[in-house]
Amino acid sequence: MPTEHLLSNTDPRDLFISLNPLGLDEKDLIKDSTGFEDQSTHNDYLLFLAGYRESHPAPQPHPEPIAWM
C-alpha cells in the first residue's frame, strides 16, 4: 500500500500526537470534537495542520475525457 494512501486515511490529530513535535505532556494531547481540549495545543495543531495539508494535498479526481479520438 503506498505511503500516500496511508497518510490520506490518517486523522491529522493522531499524527500530531504520535509525532508530538513540541514534546507536550499527555494531558495536553487530549482530543475533543474539533481539535484539542487545551487551547494552546489546539493553536499549535492548527499550524501543524496547515503544513500537513500543504505537503499532502487531497487527490484530485481524474477529469472526464472531452472526446474520444
Image: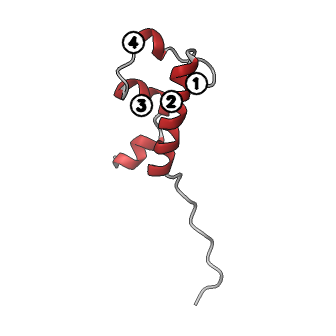
Other residues around mark 4 within 10 Å, as few (<14) / some (14–19) / many (≥20): few
Spatial separation of the CA atoms under disc 1 and disc 4: 16 Å
What residue is shown at x 55% (from left), y 33% (from top)?
46
Task: Check the image and report above or below for 9 versus 13.
Answer: below
Spatial separation of the CA atoms under disc 1 and disc 2: 8 Å
Q: Amino acid at mark 3?
A: Leu
Query: Which residue is more in the foreground, 4 or 21?
Result: 21
What residue is shown at x 52% (from left), y 42% (from top)?
50
Residue 27: x %, y % from top left: 45, 9
What residue is shown at x 60% (from left), y 86% (from top)?
68
**Which of marks 4 and 3 precedes in the sequence?**
3
Query: Which mark is in front, 3 or 4?
Result: 4
The label shown at residue 54 is none
In which quadrant is the C terminus drawn?
A: bottom right
Query: Which mark is in front, 1 or 2?
Result: 2
Spatial separation of the CA atoms under disc 4 and disc 2: 14 Å
Which residue, given by chain and number where applicable, does mark 4 sit on?
Answer: 25
Which residue, given by chain and number where applicable, does mark 3 sit on?
Answer: 15
Secondary-structure class at tag 1: loop
Which residue, given by chain and number where applicable, does mark 1 sit on?
Answer: 35
Spatial separation of the CA atoms under disc 3 and disc 2: 10 Å
**Which of marks 2 and 4 precedes in the sequence?**
4
Secondary-structure class at tag 4: loop
**Whether label 1 touches label 2, CB < 8 Å:** yes
Residue 32: quadrant of the picture: top right
Residue 13: x %, y % from top left: 49, 28
**Which of marks 2 and 3 precedes in the sequence?**
3
Secondary-structure class at tag 2: helix
Residue 64: quadrant of the picture: bottom right
Which residue, given by chain and number where applicable, does mark 2 sit on?
Answer: 45
What residue is shown at x 54% (from left), y 21% (from top)?
40
